[in-house]
């Protein structure tokens, strides 16, 4: 049986046709990949904000059991099992994420090993506002009155948890000290992952609600300050 060579030549792609197909595929990838990247980042934003909201649900359940005092950070507590994130984990059915999906760091504590031997590791992607800790030198007493949410001026305007950057400042630390920032936005940014979600990050307020904000919306002199429990949303000593 003879092969019809003309028919085989007719069915084959020419080099020009192959190049056209490749060019179309490359064009479609160029259009779709940025959209897919944005969709993935949006999903990470939502997952992180959802985690913050779960923390809010957990702290709302915890407060009645603690006389409305917030759980401690590692600042005055040596046992990691008594840190705020572990405590909140006991008050929610959803698993709380220690790592934000957009946090690319890989230096987190391995809880199956002794924590004291991991001095270059981080506890989590999140940090609490030390001004709301059970003890704080700013308020000059052994017990910080602002650790009780009922004494915070406006809990809905006072940040308790923020996202922490992947830096050595947070090696075996889970809290920040806004009182040291002295009104400098540039200095303060070292202690908050202010750009983790496209120039924004997520914050949990003392009343249990979560928001995604630009850092300057939380801390700007003169202007809004969501960090001081005795004054938020204003600055201390400003009526």
Image: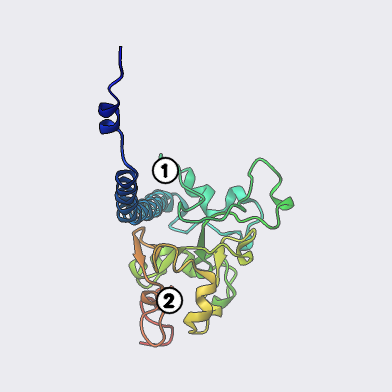
At 48% across and 66% down in the image, what residue appears?
A: 193
Q: Position of residue 5 (x, y in %)?
A: 30, 26
Q: Position of residue 53 (x, y in %)?
A: 36, 53
Q: Please tell me whether residue 212 is drawn above or below residue 121 in the rendered image.
A: below
Q: Within 10 angstroms of label 2, few (less than 14), some, or many (20 or more) residues?
A: many
Give the quadrant of the N terminus.
top left
Q: Is residue 205 visible?
A: no
Q: Position of residue 146 (x, y in %)?
A: 47, 69
At 61% across and 61% down in the image, what residue appears?
A: 173
Q: Which residue is mark 2?
A: 230
Nearest the eye: 140 or 25: 25
Q: Is residue 11 visible?
A: yes
Q: Position of residue 205 (x, y in %)?
A: 38, 63
Which one is earlier in the sequence, the residue at label 2 or at label 1? 1
Q: Within 10 angstroms of label 1, few (less than 14), some, or many (20 or more) residues?
A: some
Kindly state the secondary structure of the residue where label 1 is placed: loop
| Residue 148: mark in rendering | none
What separation in Å lies between label 2 and label 1 (alpha carbons)?
A: 29 Å
Q: Nearer the viewer, mark 2 or mark 1?
A: 1
Nearest the eye: 163 or 166: 166
- Quadrant assignment, res 169: bottom right
- Quadrant assignment, res 158: bottom left
Looking at the image, residue 173 sits to the left or right of residue 205; the answer is right
Badges 2 and 1: C-beta atoms under 8 Å apart?
no
At 35% across and 44% down in the image, what residue appears?
A: 15
Nearest the eye: 4 or 20: 4
| Residue 92: mark in rendering | 1
Kindly state the secondary structure of the residue where label 2 is placed: loop
Residue at the extreme top: 1
């Amino acid at each position: 049986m003879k092969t019809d060579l003309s028919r085989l030549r007719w069915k084959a792609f020419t080099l020009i046709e192959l190049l056209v197909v490749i060019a179309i595929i490359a064009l479609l990838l160029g259009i779709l990949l940025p959209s897919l990247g944005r969709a993935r980042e949006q999903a990470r934003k939502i997952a992180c904000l959802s985690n913050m909201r779960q923390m809010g649900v957990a702290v709302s359940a915890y407060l009645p059991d603690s006389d409305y005092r917030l759980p401690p950070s590692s600042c005055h507590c040596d046992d990691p099992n008594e840190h705020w994130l572990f405590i909140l984990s006991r008050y929610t059915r959803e698993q709380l994420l220690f790592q934000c999906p957009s946090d690319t760091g890989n230096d987190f504590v391995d809880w199956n090993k002794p924590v004291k031997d991991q001095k270059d590791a981080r506890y989590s992607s999140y940090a609490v506002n030390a001004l709301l800790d059970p003890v704080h030198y700013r308020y000059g007493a052994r017990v910080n009155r602002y650790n009780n949410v009922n004494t915070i001026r406006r809990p809905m305007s006072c940040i308790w948890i923020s996202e922490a950057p992947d830096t050595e400042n947070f090696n075996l630390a889970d809290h920040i000290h806004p009182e040291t920032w002295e009104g400098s936005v540039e200095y303060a940014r070292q202690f908050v992952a202010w750009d983790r979600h496209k120039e924004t990050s997520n914050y949990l307020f003392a009343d249990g609600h979560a928001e995604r904000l630009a850092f300057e919306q939380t801390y700007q002199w003169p202007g809004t300050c969501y960090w001081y429990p005795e004054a938020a949303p204003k600055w201390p000593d400003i009526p």
